[in-house]
Image: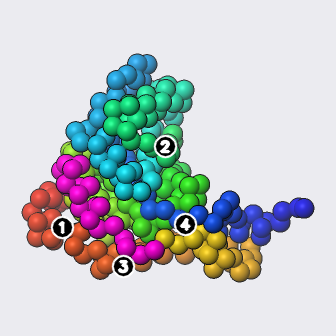
Amino acid sequence: MSTTLDDFLTAKLVGTPASARPLRPAVFVDLDGTLIEPLPADLADPTPVRFIPGAGEALARLRAAGLAVVIVTNQSGIARGYFSRAQFARLQDVLERQLQDEFGAEIDDVAVCPHSPDARGRPACLCRKPAPGMLTRAARAHGLDLHRSWMIGDTLDDVEAGHRAGARSVLLDTGGETEWRLSPLREPDGRFTDWEALVDQLLASIDPLPARPVTALASAQAPVLTVATAASRLIDASDEARASVSSSSTLFAAFRPRPAALRSSVPSPL
């Protein structure tokens, strides 16, 4: 049976679930400066990986609580020729093995953007954070509920990527953010300096709403989709992400740090 363009666009926007398993909440975790110490330019010898204090134990707790764990990382060093895809793949193998052996923490996926930014430092692709492409792609691949998920990173680009995907975003302030370009999409839902306190608060604020079955989600969105409406729906996606950020600030006000405390601890961008 032939596949029409409408069928293709419907599959991209709605998804084609293989089973009726409920959508799962997830934690999307940045790599450099959040999970591990910043990578060297040369990845010839990736062993051993040095974890940020408390990171391995934190991922084990999140997995034990039933959350999927997906690493999402910008690695423009691949495009710039600093290291190869094969070298990064070896690092990934070492990372996953150490997490399993030392902490009993299993990773569901590692999403990598190998592209370099444009001349002004902005994403030149759909996957480089602060674009949400790695998160939305992983959500489709693994049946993840973005509205019940979190992004954890050490920069406001990570925060923005999570919000653009429709998730909540937490800043792990380990010194990675140096510019502090603030905007509504770049305001974290929580700000922490250590993994233990972050996970304590995150697990205490898990969304109690029941998971949405994949089949129910697909059937609710699957009415006839024409090529003409597909482009409009893609454009509307960013508006939906902004709306989800606005609603989350009301539903999870307890998780957001007090504005006075946030203002006093964030350097002025001026």
On the image, the x and y values in percent for residue 88 come to: 48, 30
Give how far across and how far down residue 46 sits, in percent.
40, 23
Q: How many C-alpha atoms fall within 10 Å of the one at disc 3: few (<14), some, or many (≥20)?
A: few
User: Which is more N-terminal, label 1 or label 4?
Assistant: 4
Looking at the picture, which amino acid does disc 1 mark?
Answer: Pro
Near mark 4 (Cα within 10 A), the count class, few <14, some 14-19 or many ≥20, is: some
Q: Earlier in the sequence, mark 2 or mark 3?
A: 2
What residue is shown with label 2? 110
Outermost residue on the top side: it is 45
Local SS, label 3: helix
Give the Cα separation between the discs numbered 2 and 3.
Answer: 29 Å
Q: How far is the residue under mark 2 from the one under mark 4?
A: 21 Å
Identified by mark 2, the residue type is Val
In primary-sequence order, the first of circles 1 and 3 is 3
Tell me where the magenta segment starts and ends, as one range: 192-210
In which quadrant of the rendered view does residue 200 lie?
bottom left
Q: Is residue 54 above or below residue 198?
A: above
Q: In this orientation, which residue lies closer to the viewer: 204 or 125?
A: 204
Q: Residue 265, how many percent across, how many down?
A: 11, 59
**Kind of residue indicated by mark 3:** Ser
Q: Which residue bears the numbered disc 1? A: 257
Which amino acid lies under the numbered mark 4 shown in the image of this protein?
Pro
Q: State which quadrant residue 152 falls in.
A: bottom left
Name the residue that disc number 3 marks. 247
Given contact means CB atoms under 8 Å apart, are the residues at marks 4 and 1 in contact? no
Answer yes or no: do the residues labelled 2 and 4 have beta carbons within 8 Å?
A: no
Residue at x-position 34% and y-position 28%: 49
Of the 4 image quadrants, the one containing the N terminus is: bottom right
Which residue bears the numbered disc 4? 22
Say what secondary structure mark 1 lies in. loop
Q: CA distance from mark 4 to mark 1?
A: 31 Å
